[in-house]
Amino acid sequence: MRGVDMDVAERPWDGCGKCLVGVRRLFRMKAATTSPQRQRQDVLTAAASIGGHIIGWADDWEVSGATDPVTRPRLGPWLRDEMGSYDGLVAAAVDRLGRNVVDCLNTGYKMRDEGKLLLTHGHDGPWNLDDPADENRFTIEAWGAQMELRSIQRRNRDATVKARTAGRPKHQPSYGFRYVRKVMNGRVDSVELHPHAAFVIRNVAQRILADPMNVTPSSEAARLNRIGELAPADHTDMMYGKLARGRRWYPTSLKNILLSEAALGYLMHRGKPVIDQEGNPVRLCEGLWDRMTHDALKKALAARDVPFKGKPRHSNHPYLLTGIAVCGNCHSRLYTQTSADVPPRYVCTARNKGWPSAAHCRPAPLRHRF
C-alpha cells in the first residue's frame, strides 16, 4: 500500500461515506525531523486500505500528547463539529490521538457513538470498540502511550532538578537573554544578554520610569506591536530557527517581564530566584538592570494597580457575547466597555493595541449595546 495515489487519497468531501480527516501530531518540531512525512504516508496508506480519502488535515505541531484532543488547535474544531461534515478520523498510531488513556477512549467512543470511522496505521480496518477484543487492544495501545508519556515526564523532571541543583538553566531563556552552547544542541555553557532584545526591554523600562503616569505597559505593548517588534514567544522561536507566528505583545506579559527578578540575571524557579547553599540567589549573568531600577519599576507599576474609587478595574459580568463577538472591520475580538456617561457596549480595541491586522480599522466600531 506504499504506492498510494495522492490524487485519489486526498480530495474534497463527496459524500462517499469514507471522507476522513488525517490526524498528525508532534510535540517538538526540528529541522531534521521526518516524522510529519512519515505520519502523512501512514495516514494515507490507512485511508486507502478501506477505500477512503482525506478531506482535511488536523496537524498539531508543537503540541504535547498530554493535551486533550478536544482542546487541540487543529483536531479540536473537528471533534467539536465546527469544521463541517466528515466520516471519521485516521492517524498514524493511537499515540498520535493522545498519550492519555481517558482522552483516547473518549475520542474513540465519540467516533463510535456518532457512527464514524476511526483508523490507525497498522490496525486491520477501522477500530470496532463494540468488539471486546478490539476495545482491549485499543485500550492497551493507549495505555502504552500513557506509560511512555509518564516515563518522559519523569526523566524531564529529574533532569530539571539536577540542572537547578548545579546552578544551570533548563528552561527557555527569559526575554532579553540567550544561551551559549559550545556544542550544537548540547548543554548550556553560559548565559549572556541578547543585544537586540536587551535593548528593546531596557528602552521600555526607561520610558516607563521617565513618565510613569502616561507611559504604561499597555501603551508600550501597543507601540511595540506598531513598530513590528517580535513578541517574546516569536523572538524565542526565531532564536531556535523556527518561524515567527505573528504573535503580539500583551500588557500583562510585558509587565511580568519588567517585574520578574529574572531580569536581574538570576536563575529562576516558580517565579522566585534559586538560592544556593550560602543563601544567595544563583546569578547566571549580568542583569538587564540593577536592584535599584527593579524596585523603581515595581513602585511605578504598582501605582497603576490601585482600584478606581474602591472598585476593581475589571468586570466579571457574564456578558453573553464575550469571546464571540468580533469587529466587522478587522475581525478582532470585541471587548466590553463601561463608563459613567454612556451605556455598556462592545468595542474594538485592536487598533489601539497596535495590532497589524487592525491598522486600517477606522473608526473602531462600537456595537451591540445591551
Image (cartoon, helix red, strand yellow):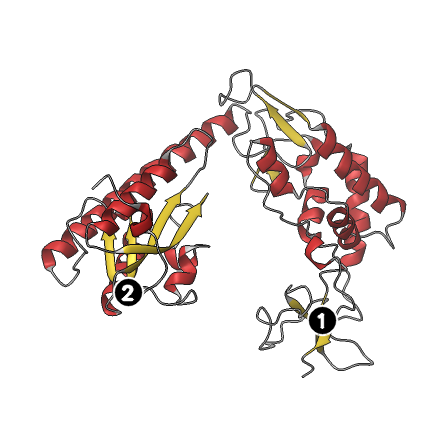
Q: Is residue 325 visible to the viewer in this orientation of the structure? A: yes
Are there few (<14), some (14-19), or many (20+) residues within 10 Å of tag 1?
A: many
Q: Is residue 219 above or below residue 279?
A: below
Q: Nearer the viewer, residue 305 or 195?
A: 195
Q: Would you name the residue on which mark 2 appears? A: 110
Q: Quadrant of residue 151?
A: top left
Q: Where's residue 37, x and y in %?
A: 36, 38
Q: Is residue 308 above or below residue 27?
A: below
| Amino acid carrying mark 2 in the image | Lys
Q: Nearer the viewer, residue 86 or 242?
A: 86
Mark carried by residue 288: none
Q: Is residue 104 left or right of residue 239?
A: left
| Amino acid carrying mark 1 in the image | Val
Q: How many marks?
A: 2
Residue at the spot 49% in from the left edge and 21% down from the top edge: 186
Q: Would you name the residue on which mark 1 appears? A: 347
Distance, label 2 to label 1, CA atoms, is 38 Å
Q: Is residue 172 left or right of residue 162?
A: right
